[in-house]
């Protein structure tokens, strides 16, 4: 009894392999593998034929299997509090530039300012076998226990901007104490003595240190600190608008307000202008981060500039150097970037009595 031969048809559900390509072209599997991995041993004409055939057949590189073999994913992760902030998007752009140049893929996640989302993101990054991780902490984060798996596996981790001190991780920051001091002193030199400070969760270094700089400037200029002049908000545009209503109900208005970001400051200024308050003559306003909004709002907003793009570049470059074993963690545990006060019309008072 003779069996009728069956046609050999590739299952559409099955992944195409290099074996399938080699069989179709009647060449060795080793040659196909080298061509796909851009090995110069394979001549250009053969490589072109192999790659065109691979594309036609729907071949996808099995990077997962390759990663298991090499124990590298060529992927780095970044967890930020909010993707939609100008500063954080600038950081991501800087990270992406370095990652692309070095041949790394980038996985981006946001905590949405909650520790639970941050924990979920950290676990996802770990399970995706990232070679290194960049993190800016959420408002809520108190413990960094959820990053322990990275430390135990010696996976490089860098905290940037919103950090926590840890001997196993690099920190990339600015001198927030100095920056807070400079803004407050500038307002004092404009003749302001009733200076409020609007900030966010003091669990985070950036807000805690800016507050300490504010207090130090007041003390150095012999201006008493007032607890009721500190307001903690989420620093959103809406919070700035709402805050204006509360402050306008005060018996004696502040003559200056230092905000820990620009968004909240702009919301506040918009609300003041609606009721005819003169900025800066009645209330001078300063922000932080030098968002493009600073030059859109009228009067233009005084703010502290530090480059998110540069912070992203520096963080990514150091992370990749550590992945490659080119940096000694104990030598470079903290990196401090420069910041500059950009003085604009929102704080320049006419005929001020400088102290």
Image (cartoon, rainbow, N blue to C red):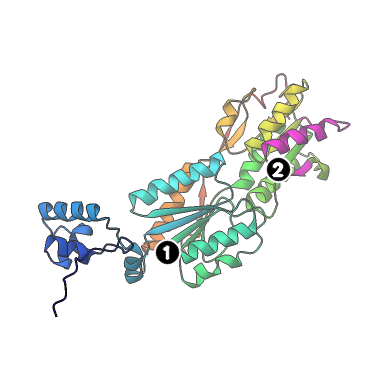
Point out the image quarter for the N terminus: bottom left
Identify which residue, 64 or 349, lies in the foreground: 64
Residue at left offset 75%, top offset 26%: 272
The reply to whether the magenta stretch includes residue 102 is no
Give the numbered dot on residue 214: 2
Find the magenta span and give its range: 230-255
Residue 90 seen by the camera: yes
Picture quadrant where residue 185 is located: top right
- Relative vertical location of residue 93 with respect to residue 294 in this rendering, above or below: below
Residue 249, image x and y in percent?
86, 32
Question: Where in the figure is residue 190, as x and y percent of width and height?
Answer: 70, 28
Residue toward you, 143 or 258: 143
Foreground residue among 142 and 71: 71
Q: Is residue 212 left or right of residue 27?
A: right
Q: What residue would you read off at disc 1?
A: 328
For residue 95, above or below residue 129: above
């Amino acid at each position: 009894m003779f069996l009728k031969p069956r046609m050999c048809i590739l299952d559409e559900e099955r992944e195409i392999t290099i074996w399938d390509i080699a069989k179709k072209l009647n060449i060795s599997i080793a040659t196909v593998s080298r061509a796909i991995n851009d090995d110069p041993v394979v001549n250009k004409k053969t490589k072109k034929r192999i790659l065109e055939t691979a594309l036609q057949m729907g071949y996808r590189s099995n990077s997962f299997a390759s990663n298991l073999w090499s124990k590298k994913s060529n992927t780095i992760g970044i967890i930020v509090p909010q993707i939609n902030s100008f500063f954080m998007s600038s950081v991501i752009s800087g990270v992406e530039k370095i990652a692309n140049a070095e041949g790394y893929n980038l996985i981006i996640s946001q905590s949405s300012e909650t520790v639970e989302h941050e924990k979920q993101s950290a676990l996802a990054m770990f399970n995706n076998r990232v070679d290194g991780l960049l993190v800016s902490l959420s408002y809520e984060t108190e413990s960094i226990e959820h990053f322990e798996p990275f430390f135990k596996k010696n996976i490089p981790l860098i905290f940037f901007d919103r950090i926590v001190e840890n001997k196993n991780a690099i920190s990339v920051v600015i001198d927030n104490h100095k920056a807070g001091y400079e803004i407050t002193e500038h307002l004092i030199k404009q003749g302001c003595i009733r200076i409020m400070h609007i900030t966010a969760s003091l669990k985070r270094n950036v807000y805690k240190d800016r507050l300490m700089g504010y207090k130090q400037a007041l003390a150095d200029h012999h201006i008493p600190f007032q607890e009721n002049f500190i307001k903690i908000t989420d620093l959103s545009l809406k919070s700035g608008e709402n805050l204006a209503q509360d402050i306008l109900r005060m018996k004696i208005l502040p003559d200056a307000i230092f905000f820990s970001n620009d968004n909240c400051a702009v919301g506040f200024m918009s609300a003041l202008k609606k009721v005819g308050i003169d900025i800066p003559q009645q209330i001078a306003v300063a922000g932080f981060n030098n968002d493009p909004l600073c030059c859109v709002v009228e009067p233009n907003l005084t703010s502290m500039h530090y480059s998110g793009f540069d912070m992203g570049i520096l963080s990514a470059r150091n992370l990749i150097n550590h992945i490659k074993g080119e940096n000694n963690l104990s030598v470079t545990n903290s990196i401090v970037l420069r910041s500059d006060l950009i003085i604009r019309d929102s704080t320049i008072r006419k005929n001020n009595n400088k102290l």
